[in-house]
Image (cartoon, rainbow, N blue to C red):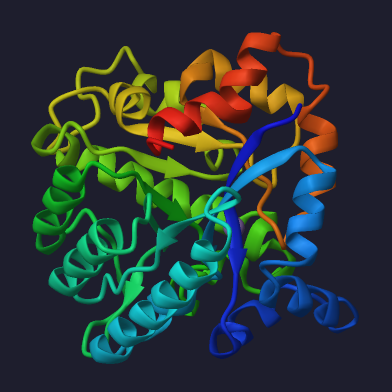
Amino acid sequence: MQGKIALEEHFALEETLKDSAGFAPADDWVELKGRLLDIQERRLREMDANGIELMLLSLNAPAVQAIPDRGRATELSQRANDYLAEQVARRPQRFQGLAALPMQDPDAAARELDRCVTSLGFRGALVNGFSELAGTDGALYYDRREFWPFWSEVERLDVPFYLHPRNPLAKDAAIYEGHRWLMGPTWAFGQETAVHALRLMGSGLFDAYPRLQIILGHMGEGLPYSIWRVDNHNKWMRAQNVYPAKRKIADYFRENFYITTSGNFRTQALIDAMLEIGADRILFSADWPFENIDHAAAWFDVATIAEGDRFKIGRENARTLFKL
Ligand code: MN
């Protein structure tokens, strides 16, 4: 399919490169490093060869989210966003930007998102999971009340927020002890991000800000397959899930979430997602440079789905959501 739009596609600054080093064996690091630093050369050739017209670009992970100092997190966000804006300006028909945000400081994050959308023309934000903050004992998840003014600003600006994975903190990763292979994209990314998304849904955030739109990668981080059970376990018992939100979790999933195909190039999983969240809320993505663009495109272009759905998922849904 020609004219595809991909939106979980990353780059790195020299200073954030090290954040990605752990995700490639030493033998592959030279290749990954080259892919991360490049925007206008190799990446563009890969896009041309695989029918991708436009990429929405975002900083690698965890980068800003792992900087416990608020000032430094804010400064790195601004520097990354300014760099991305320069790169987008060179080829705005081929690249658009998603903002990195210093969520450690919700006010600063709201101001930076406003700057990115209003002044730099970015199409939304991509944040790498929970944030670390000096003086707090762990991970800050964005269902917490101090983030609600930030979410109000996201709704006002009317741009999507991509909740991208990161690994859990060591203190929250006891279950993976002795099984390091389960960290990262194998399993821990999906588990971490799915729970964060469920926290947002159960918190009542989407009752307060019903127009918020959150994007999850990797075919929804397992949620399409599990969302029915979240709402329907042990149905004969009198007590059902107790949480502050007013509606069923699946209602929020279908009205406030989009998912992408990033890193999950599997027709069986796509069809399940289409049956749960619907083809209107699924978006093509590759997850370059961690996944290959040709692997994503070779799969998606011939996946056994209706051509109308391929057109929506490959291109049209993104055009509508990001107002491209
Ligand atoms: Mn990614």
> Is residue 284 toward the left or the right of residue 50 in the image?
left
Where residue 163 appears, x then y in whole percent? 41, 52
Residue 136 visible, this angle: yes
Where residue 96 appears, x then y in whole percent? 49, 54
> Is residue 60 toward the left or the right of residue 105 in the image?
right
In what quadrant of the picture does the C terminus appear? top left
Q: How many marks?
A: 0
Residue 277 visible, this angle: no
Where residue 318 appears, x then y in whole percent? 49, 33
Name the quadrant where ligand 1 sits: bottom right
Residue in the foreground of this view, choosing between 273 and 89: 89
Where residue 139 appears, x then y in whole percent? 33, 72
Which residue sits furthest front?
90
Q: Residue at x 63, y 42 (%)?
A: 285
Which residue sits furthest right?
27
> Is residue 139 toward the left or the right of residue 108 in the image?
right
Q: Quadrant of residue 201?
A: top left
Q: Quadrant of residue 137?
A: bottom left
In what quadrant of the picture does the N terminus appear? top right
Q: Residue at x 84, y 82 (%)?
A: 30
Q: Residue at x 85, y 45 (%)?
A: 49
Q: Residue at x 29, y 47 (%)?
A: 199
Residue in the foreground of this view, choosing between 238 and 225: 225
